[in-house]
Image (cartoon, grey):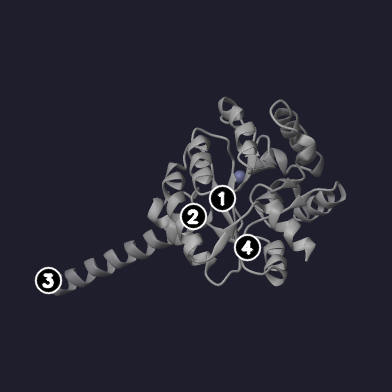
Amino acid sequence: MKVSGKAVCRGLAALVLLCLVLYFLAGRWKYHSGAETDIPDDGLAVQAAAVLEGQYACLTFDDGPSENTAAILEILARYQAPATFFVTAQPINEPYLDQLPLIQAGENQIALHSASHRYADIYKSTTDFWLDIKQLRQVLSAWVDVEEIHWLRFPGGSTNTISHRYGGSGIMKELVAQAEEKGYHWIDWNVCAEDATSAHPDAAAILRNIQKDARGKEVCVVLMHDTAATGETVKALPAVLDWFSEQGYEFCTVEQMYTMTKAQ
Ligand SMILES: [Zn+2]
């Protein structure tokens, strides 16, 4: 059989195209297989936006403290921008727990995230979840006044579906109800920096991700991370703070945003 050069070219072009499509799809899948939900609950931000005058940005940092915490605190202080830190107590956090009093000293808010942050453990049952939170409170109590801590953020967000694998499809609804019964306030986010995804965005991409999500929102609750792996978040932070300031936003903690909302 004689195959023309043209046919070979067409075949090769089709193969390259197929590879590109597969590569793109694999990238999308990988990107969206991150632990965080794609559809977080934005209820509090929406409520706040409905009643507050002006624009507010609540920067939030999950999964710290880490070797990057000191730099984040220094930048926040320079901009006089308070933020909220949803902390964990994993072995990797341990050498940096001495940052906790410094977080508080800077008018920032410390809130609960998880002790272990292991989905398979914390979402096995509601009992396991609250045991993990109890353990986190115990660790924190050596450093800060835990009686002052009333806020939490569920790992993966309140609408995450990864938890269904371990604790069944109703576990998040149960946990949300129990959190409220226990007197906790909880919050997800409505702006995602996507700084802890497997795409490993650089500082410029982190800023773009934030700008894209923040557009048109009067109140932004921005999800970022404070881990050893998120050095690019530190690099992006001054530009993020500059951009929100230029757009007319004021910075506040989640708790401050909530208190202002309730006062209306
Ligand atoms: Zn987390």
Q: Which residue is outermost to the right?
A: 181
Q: Is mark 4 within 8 Å of ligand 1?
A: no
- Which mark sits nearer the N-terminus, 3 or 2? 3
**Mark 1 touching mark 2, by CB under 8 A?**
yes
> Residue 100, position in %: x, y?
63, 33
Residue 74 image offset from top left, x and y in percent:
50, 39
Mark 1–mark 3 CB contact (< 8 Å):
no
Q: Residue at x 50, y 60 (%)?
A: 245
Q: Name the residue under label 4.
A: 39
**Looking at the rendered structure, which numbered label has been put on residue 241?**
2
The answer, for residue 117, to whether it is visible in the render is no
**Of callouts 1 and 2, the N-terminal one:** 1
Label 2 vs label 4, nearer the camera: 2
Left or right: residue 187 versus residue 184 is left
Mark 1 vs mark 3: give the one in front: 1
Q: Nearer the viewer, residue 69 or 15?
A: 69
Q: Is residue 145 visible?
A: yes
Residue mark closest to the camera, 3 vs 4: 4
Residue ID for mark 1:
81
Whichever of labels 4 and 1 marks the residue nearer the N terminus, that label is 4
Q: Quadrant of residue 135?
A: top right
Indicate the secondary structure of the residue bearing disc 4. loop
Q: What residue type is labelled 1?
A: Ala
Closest to the camera, between mark 4 and mark 1, is: 1
The residue to which callout 3 is attached is 5
